[in-house]
Amino acid sequence: MMPAPESHSLIVERRLRHAPEKVWRALTQSWLIDEWLMSNDFVPEVGRRFTLRAPAPLPEWSGVTHCQVITVEPARLLAYRWGDGTESASGLKTIVTWTLTPQEGGTLLRMEQSGFPSTTALSYQRLDRSWPGFLDKLDQIAGLSGD
């Protein structure tokens, strides 16, 4: 039997000055996700399929990410499958998991994107550079998202 292919995860954690409910709102309301990540048709319902659309494609990526919600625990945990839309075995298929932990004066937000096979090194590198900036924007949007 052949060993399973090696996979990698990206993890970004931030301490935000906002209550978990405000961070949750920024993570789950489509119009707010537009502001910090990409245009989308997200609805926080388990099993719901949605797409994220970048303003322009990149080399080796159409700019469209196909996703499916797999876990919704309000103000605590959100997870979805994240794929690049290809049907090939070498296409990007990962899981993004958001964990919100209440802390005094705010929320510890943890984003883990897991399951990067070694064959998707370019995608891993791009997302490794992109997630910190996305979380900076999410922090700003959470602060503006109302009470």
Image: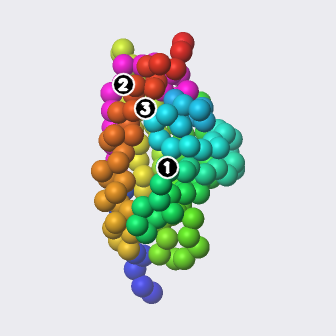
Q: Give the image quarter of residue 6.
A: bottom left
What is the spatial separation of the Cα atoms under label 1 and label 3, in whole angstroms?
Answer: 18 Å
Q: Is residue 131 left or right of residue 91?
A: left
* Mark closer to the chain start, 2 or 3: 2
Report, in whole angstroms, how far the alpha carbon at label 2 lies from the one at label 3. 10 Å
Range shown magenta: 10-25
Q: Is residue 20 magenta?
A: yes
Front position among marks 1 and 3: 1
The residue indicated by pointer 3 is: 138
The answer, for residue 12, to whether it is visible in the render is: yes
Question: Which one is earlier in the sequence, the residue at label 1 or at label 2?
Answer: 2
The foreground one among 134 and 8 is: 134
**Closer to the observer: label 1 or label 2?**
1
Q: Nearer the viewer, residue 23 or 99?
A: 23
Q: Position of residue 64 (x, y in %)?
A: 55, 57
Amino acid at circle 2: Leu
Query: Which circle's residue, 1 or 3, is located before the other in the chain?
Result: 1
Nearer-the-camera pick, 67 or 108? 67
Q: Secondary structure at mark 3?
A: helix
Q: Where is mark 1, residue-wise? A: 55
Residue 120 picture location, percent across and down:
39, 69
Return the residue at label 2: 16
In front of the other: 103 or 58: 58
- Give the amino acid type for the residue marked by disc 3 in the picture: Leu
Q: Is residue 39 left or right of residue 142?
A: right
Tell me the distance, in whole angstroms, between the alpha carbons under discs 1 and 2. Answer: 27 Å
